[in-house]
Image (tube, rainbow, N blue to C red):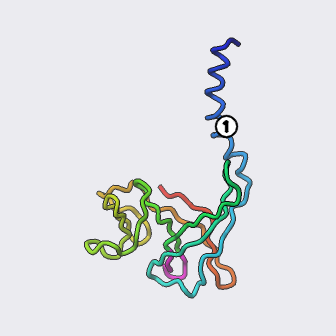
Amino acid sequence: MGTGGFMASMLLVPPLRMAVDPLLKAGEEKPFVPVADVNEITDEPKRFEFTLKINDAWVKNQATTYSAWVYKQGSEIVALSPICKHLGCTVNWNASPEHPNMFYCPCHGGLYTKDGINVPGTPPRAPLDLYEVKVEGGKLYLGPLIQRT
């Protein structure tokens, strides 16, 4: 293998590592974090903030704040990511007088229904992601995001 072959292999190693690394970590359990008392949750979406300790390649145990829009739908609790699927801006509930009772993204006028489904004809191309939800001892715990398409 000559110099050209060696250099070509060096270009392939990083993408290959990026593809394989998540598979190697697939067995890691994602933590559930306490977010709210269940009695604070109503049928009107309310924003709750929570903190996770993140480990990445540069920083260990970095406290990072996240949020979720949480509401009751019948006996179920729904927790939506506030991150717009268009360009990553933050959506707000009932923030547009022209579009009441919807999630609205102020960046480019994106709209989502209460259940996080993107409204056709507006910029978002996919629904808002959902958090895994668990209730224990009267507390709401949120887990990993579930991507919807």
| Image side of residue 24 versus residue 141, left or right | right
Residue 58 placement (x, y as % from top left)? 67, 49
Name the residue located 61 percent from the left edge and 27 percent from the top edge.
11
User: In the image, which residues are magenta?
Assistant: 70-77
| Image side of residue 36 versus residue 96, left or right | right
Name the residue located 53 percent from the left edge and 75 percent from the top edge.
48
Image quarter for residue 10?
top right
| Image side of residue 119 versus residue 12, left or right | left
Residue 23 placement (x, y as % from top left)? 69, 45
Image quarter for residue 108?
bottom left
Outermost residue to the left: 98
What main secondary structure does the magenta stretch of the protein show? strand
Residue 80 placement (x, y as % from top left)? 50, 68
Residue 50 placement (x, y as % from top left)? 59, 71
Above or below, 139 against 85 in this view is below
On whether residue 72 falls in the magenta region, the answer is yes
**Quadrant (top left/top right/bottom left/bottom right) for the N terminus:** top right
Name the residue located 64 percent from the left edge and 78 percent from the top edge.
135
Above or below, 51 against 122 in this view is below
Residue under pointer 1: 17
Outermost residue to the bottom: 39
Above or below, 39 against 52 in this view is below
Name the residue located 72 percent from the left edge and 60 percent from the top edge.
29
Q: Amino acid at mark 1?
A: Arg
